[in-house]
Every structure is written in structure tokens, then in C-alpha cells.
Amino acid sequence: MTADQDREDVHRVLEGDISSFGNIVRRWQNPLVNLAFRFCRDRQRSEEMAQDAFMQIFRNLEKFRGEAAFSTWIFSVSLNVYRSALRRKSLPVKSIDDLMDLAAGQIPYLQIEQQERDELIRQAVALLPKRYRDAIIVFYFREMNLTETAAILRVSEGTAKAWLHRGREMLRNKLERRSTTTAAAKEVRP
């Protein structure tokens, strides 16, 4: 996936060769579906959200000015589409504390496996306030650098850095509290 291919396909689409948009979809389909999945945790819904994002990208392709990388622009547009989709059809809300209690209490005194811990973290991230959730998803799960994250979120690097810091702190506090509760329960065990 190269920036030159993206720019060339954008130019072709804008010149009237609509079929070139298929090249963009092929290159970006998996990354956009994966990004949507980080928000909704439902494969079918994430595919629908990505399709909506591609429709929005196509409709607004002339707005891509080339000042930023195409990847930055496409993720920014997609992020806005995903936020709107989540507002329209919200997921059941659980508190982070409930998730921690559930994970710790399903099978008493049993250590949570790494995969379960990862899922617990993903669920906890999904429950963060929007600005912190989006920053963490873009920076950590999409593995963007700070500059790219700030551009996608359309904020300054300082703001993106602050959101990342605050989001990590919120997660750390919840996870530490869960860890302390689990350790205390093990000490009481006969």
C-alpha cells in the first residue's frame, strides 16, 4: 500500500474513472473493518460500518487535498462515520467496574488467561469517554504515531498526548483496583 497508488487512484476517480475507487477499497477494506471492529466488537456490524465509511469517503473524495497522507484522511473520515454509527445505535452500556467484577468473579480464584485479559482491556477501552477511547484505539490498536493520531482526531499533538495519558490513567486505575480486589480474595481463600 503506497501513498503514490492512493493519490493516483484518487486522481483517476476525480477524473471520472469510478472503477479506480475499487483499488482504494481493496487496499483499505481490512484496515477500516478492523478499526470499526475496535468500536463495536461485532464483525458483521464492523463490515457495515466500513461500507458506510467508504460511501462517505467516495462522496467526499474531492475534499482530499493531499496536505496529509491519504491514510490519515481516510481514517479521520472513517472515525467520524463510526462515531455517528455508535450514536445512532448504541451498544448496551456496562460500567468498567462491572466488567472487572465479572472477570474476577466468574470462576473464583482462577487466573484470567492472557486472551481474556486482552478482551477485558478492549472492553474497558470501549467504555472510556469518547475522546480517550478514540485516542487509544488510533494510537495503540491502529499503531499510529502521535502526529498521525492527532491529525486523525483533528486535534493538536498536545491534546492527543493529554487524551492518551488520561485514557491510560483511567484504564490503569480500573485494572489496578481489579487486581487488588483479586489479590485480597486470594489471601482470604482457605
Image: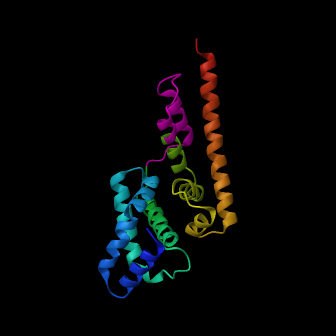
Q: Quadrant of the N terminus?
A: bottom left
The front one of 29 and 117 is 29
Queried whether the magenta region covers residue 99, the answer comes back as yes
Q: Nearer the viewer, residue 149 or 3?
A: 3
**117 is within the stretch colored magenta:** yes
Q: Which residue is the extreme one toward the bottom?
A: 15
Residue 40 at x, y = what percent?
43, 53
Q: In percent of the image, x 31 and y 81: which residue is there?
A: 18
Vertical position of residue 125 compared to residue 154: above or below: above
Q: What residue sits 50% from the left and 35% below the top?
A: 114
Q: Quadrant of the C terminus?
A: top right
Residue at 61% across, 45% down: 171
Q: Is residue 80 left or right of residue 97?
A: left
Q: Which residues are magenta?
A: 92-118
Residue 187 x/y as whole percent: 63, 18
Residue drawn at the location 55% of the way across and 67% of the way down: 152
The colour mode here is rainbow
